[in-house]
């Protein structure tokens, strides 16, 4: 029997083969492991602190009927939230102290009013289970779906929450940086990736009436030093904030802003851009289009939604888990990025599709 062929039956009918999960955790098997059955029941069988990264998108509440039923069919949203928290309590138990949990969750309407499910779930996780919320990402679907309602705006975004269970965790920010533009030398002068040569800043410093003589001298020296860092490739770009010329980029109060304090004490400060590029923002523009031409499971959950979480928060030798795997998008992306993974779903039909998708990669 292959590891990917494990199938778990109904609750309280767990076969001895669940031990294969532990075998998979210590194996070098690259092909994803798929488990069919109730997610909560299966997660209870996992050893603690064994998973590096969890990424999932649970079924929407009250909006779709999935094969084999499952979560999302509750009469009240409170029941839906409570069921999710039962599962997420087990997720917290099985992820490593260095691990991360990325949750994509959609909202719903009840009697004309948005329920606010994403934040209800997130706040309950923080308040009841002591999760640490590191980011609330807005997934902008760019196009979104048609909306025939004549009394509200069209909904084209969902939340992706990044949770951790400890304040020190694995995060490889360099793996997700965008490629920076290159600085160049023009007529002997260094020019940053966006065309900053320092000429305007020098002029502003020399003509400033807001700087003292010593502050002007120090500002010019600091500017030359930063330009040399750009020339040497230690910075990709920069901006200079000079007292009386540019506004502070944060609070004007020196009591709450270190940059405002630096501006008050030195007369200037720099915004320096990392030489490896900028890290992604918390707004992701990702089309929800299905490139797999699937005939079942029409969730808009796209492959690109998984890439940043896996690259940033799962080590190369780590294991990714999706407790609502569906047709295996998370597992497919994990495999493509060189990570091992486990997928759980209540539907054998969905997992058949998932196995076929991932077997094409081996």
Image (cartoon, rainbow, N blue to C red):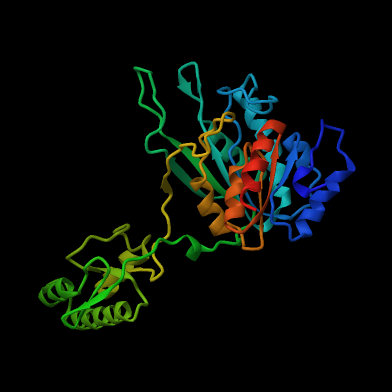
169 or 181: nearer the eye?
Answer: 181
User: Viewed as shown, does residue 168 lie left or right of 252?
Assistant: right
Residue at 46 percent across and 37 percent down: it is: 289
Horizontal and vertical percent position of residue 239: 27, 67
Horizontal and vertical percent position of residue 137: 47, 46
Horizontal and vertical percent position of residue 48: 77, 52
User: Viewed as shown, does residue 253 lie left or right of 84?
Assistant: left
150 or 303: nearer the eye?
Answer: 303
Horizontal and vertical percent position of residue 82: 67, 31
Residue at 66 percent across and 63 percent down: it is: 317
91 or 146: nearer the eye?
Answer: 146
Q: How many marks?
A: 0
The answer to whether residue 347 is visible is: no
Residue at 29 percent across and 71 percent down: it is: 269
Residue 158 position (above or below residue 135): above
297 or 58: nearer the eye?
Answer: 297
The answer to whether residue 14 is visible is: yes
Residue 211 sits in which quadrant? bottom left
Residue 321 position (above or below residue 181): above
Residue 136 position (above or below residue 105): below
Residue at 49 percent across and 47 percent down: it is: 304
């Amino acid at each position: 029997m292959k590891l990917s062929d494990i199938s778990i039956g109904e609750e309280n009918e767990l076969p001895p083969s669940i031990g294969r999960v532990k075998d998979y955790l210590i194996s070098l098997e690259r092909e994803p492991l798929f488990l069919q059955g109730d997610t909560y029941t299966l997660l209870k069988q996992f050893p603690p602190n064994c998973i590096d990264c969890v990424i999932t998108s649970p079924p929407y509440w009250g909006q779709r009927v999935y094969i084999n039923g499952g979560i999302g069919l509750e009469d009240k949203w409170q029941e839906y939230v409570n069921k999710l928290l039962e599962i997420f309590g087990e997720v917290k138990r099985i992820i490593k102290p260095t691990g991360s949990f990325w949750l994509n969750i959609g909202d719903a309407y009840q009697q004309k009013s948005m329920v606010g499910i994403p934040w209800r779930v997130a706040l309950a996780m923080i308040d009841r289970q002591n999760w640490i919320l590191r980011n609330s990402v807005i997934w902008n679907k760019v196009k979104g779906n048609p909306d025939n309602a004549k009394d509200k705006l069209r909904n084209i975004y969902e939340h992706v929450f990044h949770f951790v269970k400890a304040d020190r965790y694995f995060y490889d920010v360099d793996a997700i940086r965008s490629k920076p533009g290159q600085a160049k030398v023009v007529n002997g002068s260094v020019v940053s990736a966006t065309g900053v040569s320092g000429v305007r800043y020098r002029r502003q410093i020399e003509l400033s009436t807001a700087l003292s003589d010593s502050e002007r001298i120090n500002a010019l020296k600091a500017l030359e030093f930063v330009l040399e860092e750009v020339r040497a490739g230690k910075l990709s770009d920069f901006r200079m904030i000079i007292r009386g010329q540019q506004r502070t980029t944060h609070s004007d109060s020196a009591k709450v802003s270190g940059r405002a304090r630096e501006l008050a004490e030195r007369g200037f400060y720099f915004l320096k851009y990392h030489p490896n590029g900028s890290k992604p923002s918390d707004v992701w523009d990702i089309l929800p289009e299905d490139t797999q031409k699937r005939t079942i499971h029409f969730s808009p959950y796209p492959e690109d939604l998984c890439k940043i979480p896996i690259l940033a928060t799962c080590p190369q030798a780590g294991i990714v888990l999706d407790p609502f795997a569906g047709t295996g998008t998370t597992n497919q992306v994990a495999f493509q990025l060189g990570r091992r993974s486990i997928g759980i779903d209540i539907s054998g039909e969905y997992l058949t599709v998932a196995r076929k998708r991932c077997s094409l990669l081996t």
